[in-house]
Amino acid sequence: MSTGWPAAPVVYEIDTWPFLEGVSRRLGHPVTLADVPAEVWDETLPPGADAVWLMGVWERSPAGLVVARANEDLQRSFREALPDLRPADVVGSPYCVRRYRVDAHLGGPGGLATARAELARRGLRLVLDYVPNHVAPDHPAVAERPEWFVQGDEADERKEPAGWFRAAGRILAHGRDPYFPPWPDVAQLNAFAPELRTATAAALADIAGQCDGIRCDMAMLLTNEVFARTWGSHVGPAPAGEFWPAVIGRLRTHRPEAVLIAEAYWDLEWTLQHQGFDFCYDKRLYDRLAHESAAAVRGHLAAGRDYQDKLIRFIENHDEPRAATALPGGRDRAAAVAIATLPGATLWHEGQFEGRRTHLPVFLARLPDEPVDEDLRAFYRRLLAVVAGMRRGDWTMLDAGGWPDNPTHAEVLAWAWHDDVPHHLVAINLSDHPAQARVALPWPALAGRSWRLIDLIDGRVFERDGDQLTAGGLYVDLPPWGHHLFAITA
């Protein structure tokens, strides 16, 4: 990658407003991005991370906040997360953007610049959000640039009153995707409008001047096929060119070094990779690790490296349930070892390492008090530290064979990073029962010498004969959700 980023970056997401609120409560005085103490950064940022995504730094919308406070469903979700909810806890959605200027409450542009410098001093890059599909209803463009928006008429308003609103003498659409009701706090941008494409490129260039990477929210909504299916006659025929190649092409002329991450669903990752994104969410892998079998994961990982290298893998982020609840009983650790050792980028979420269980709505400024799982935190921090530098050379899925009277080998996933012989090998039992397997090691150069296998997670050391490894494979006996992450040395 010509950006200077590592080929497989490790990204750590921080929910900015709750993070700063927590630091403020701990220190007993208000803290912004401008004055987070160095020791707080040091204890917050995990070893092995390459970048920090400060989620939710932009100016939030007062109009959106009014909608959030009046919405009964949202209020119910707020109280579920914070039983002692106070009015000041509800600060509005970070995806209902009033302006792409750092919110004054968080420290403004100067505070962000200070935080970026603190991260850079620790060798970390900064990632920020961009929301291409919609803006807040009080964004200046709603009144000043109506050609940027999807517009309707009184018949649309009568037919679907929840889907439209009036602003500056026009009827504009609320934002939406094709599978859910409209979002009542945002105005829908028109991806087919040439003026909007030009403005998007300019906005991205401005954001790129304040960070090192940009995560584009719901990026697949702006592809011609999805946007036409969502909006039909309201936006007319699709233009000849796609939205993202046009926008990213302009951006690259000004900010060629910026890394772009697409939030992507509906199997459109390959499409968005080819339209210019450096990395795309791998939601399919998340679903398979969380809910499906080893066979489903194995099939997913059969894709080529050219595709896998441009995915960003995760088992938690601000949109998903907490991993400690969604992947219980040790499944979270097995899945974490998997994504940490596969090709592609990885994404980790603040609170995931500590075992937080409450999924906080993005509208809220305060996390609930929860006990820290010290053992889980030690596991995650060790995992990120030991995999740093591991993903180099070639990567190969390995066959895990078994015996006619023991089908548990089907639950074992295995792969290796290697040159002429493996330097790291991973074996994972993706099931809630013990599993045994022989992992095939198709490297003739292993023969004729002894090898030491060091489990980098628990520290155990195994001596193995190379002739036996090449002839019969590596025997593994794994407990439920068990795993090995071996460094292999002569």
Image: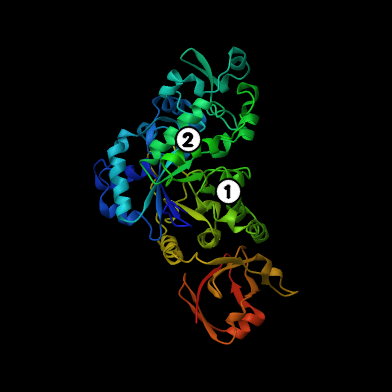
Horizontal side of residue 63 vs 451, given as left or right = left
The disc label shown at residue 131, or none = 2
Residue behind mark 1: 283
The answer for how far apart the CA atoms under marks 2 and 1 are is: 19 Å
Of 220 and 251, nearer the camera is 251
Q: Which quarter of the picture shows residue 477?
A: bottom right
Residue 488 position within the rendered picture, expressed as x and y whole percent measured from the top left: 51, 76
Q: Residues within 10 Å of mark 1 (few under 14, many from 20)?
A: many
Residue sitting nearer the eye, 456 or 134: 134
Query: Which corner quadrant of the image does residue 430 belong to?
Result: bottom right
* Residue 195 position within the rendered picture, expressed as x and y whole percent measured from the top left: 50, 25
Which residue sits at x=72%, y=75%?
403
Q: Nearer the viewer, residue 209 or 283?
A: 209
The kind of residue on which mark 1 rests is: Lys
Q: How is the image coloured?
A: rainbow
Give whichever of discs 2 and 1 has the lower sequence position.
2
Q: Residue 415's x, y, as percent?
A: 59, 67
Q: How many marks?
A: 2
| Residue type (three-letter) at the residue carrying disc 2 | Val
* Residue occupying the point 64% across, 34% down: 225
Q: Residue at x 35, y 54 (%)?
A: 44
- Label 2 with label 1: CB-CB less than 8 Å: no
Label 2 crowd bin: few (<14), some (14–19), many (20+), radius 10 Å: some
Checking the image for residue 116, the label placed there is none
Which image quarter: residue 105? top left
282 versus 404 height, above or below: above
Whether residue 33 is visible:
no
The answer to whether residue 180 is above or below residue 234 is: below
> Where 86 sits versus 387, above or below?
above
Judge whether residue 48 can be spotted in this image.
Answer: yes
Camera-nearest residue between 237 and 410: 237
Q: Position of residue 72 (x, y in %)?
A: 50, 28
